[in-house]
Amino acid sequence: AYPFLSMLQNPHFPLGLALLVGMILNINQQQKKIYLAVNVILSLLLAVILPFGIVLLGAIVFIWTVINFLRYHRLILGPFITAITPGGIIVIMQYIWTLTDPFLRLWNEQNITLTGPIWNFLLSFMPALLFAAFFVVRAIKQKEQESMVVLLVIWLLVGAVLSYIPFPLQRRFVLGYQIPTVLLAG
């Protein structure tokens, strides 16, 4: 996934990825108000530095919230509201500006970054993806309860799905895909 190879030329990739990882680590700390405040600041920074990180994080946190509700029958909205709402507002404003500003609209028409064929995606992350898939199957069979493992599995699945949604900037959602792949494989 592109941040590793481009970090020397584009510092916003690794910085945005670090913010994304920091926010994912904060999700499990929903009881502590300091982490919720930190999430608001990180969300605003992520939206400005790497807007697609907010979309990826939003999908991960949304699915995590639903899974926790189904497992424990309690709705934990703190991480979702603090991590997604501040940055989400900025990303929506940026998107509206991109559609309405004549210069940005023309630039956006040529800004197409589709994900390559699925076999390229799979081969790019092999053999780690095979080991990660093996671990995911095993974790599902054993009903893995560790919250960080659940978050990594969600990131692995969401990243793959978002990378192929019908959207002209698909490849942006491969952001940091090596992180859940390698951690689950390990």
Image: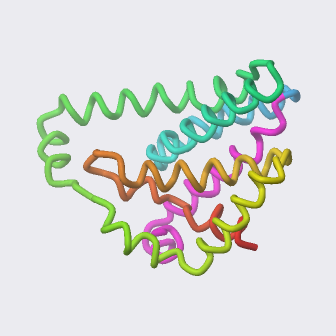
> Residue 51: which quarter of the image?
top left
Whether the magenta-drawn stretch holds residue 20 is answered as yes
Farthest residue, direction top: 74
Q: Nearer the viewer, residue 180 or 37?
A: 180
Residue displayed at 63% across by 66% down: 181
Farthest residue, direction front: 141
Q: Quadrant of the C terminus?
A: bottom right
Give the magenta-colored segment's residue range.
1-30
Residue displayed at 75% across by 29% down: 37
Whether the magenta-drawn stretch holds residue 13 is answered as yes
Give the mark count.
0
> Residue 30: which quarter of the image?
top right
18 is higher (above) or lower (below) than 45: below
15 is higher (above) or lower (below) than 92: below
Q: Position of residue 177 (x, y in %)?
A: 55, 62
Q: Nearer the viewer, residue 94 or 186?
A: 186
Q: Position of residue 28 (x, y in %)?
A: 81, 39
Most frequent secondary structure within the magenta stretch: helix
**What is the basis of the colouring in this image?**
rainbow
Residue displayed at 60% across by 32% down: 62
Q: Is residue 63 left or right of residue 104?
A: right
11 is higher (above) or lower (below) than 159: below
Q: Is residue 8 left or right of residue 21?
A: left
Q: Position of residue 131 (x, y in %)?
A: 67, 73
Q: Position of residue 52 (x, y in %)?
A: 44, 46
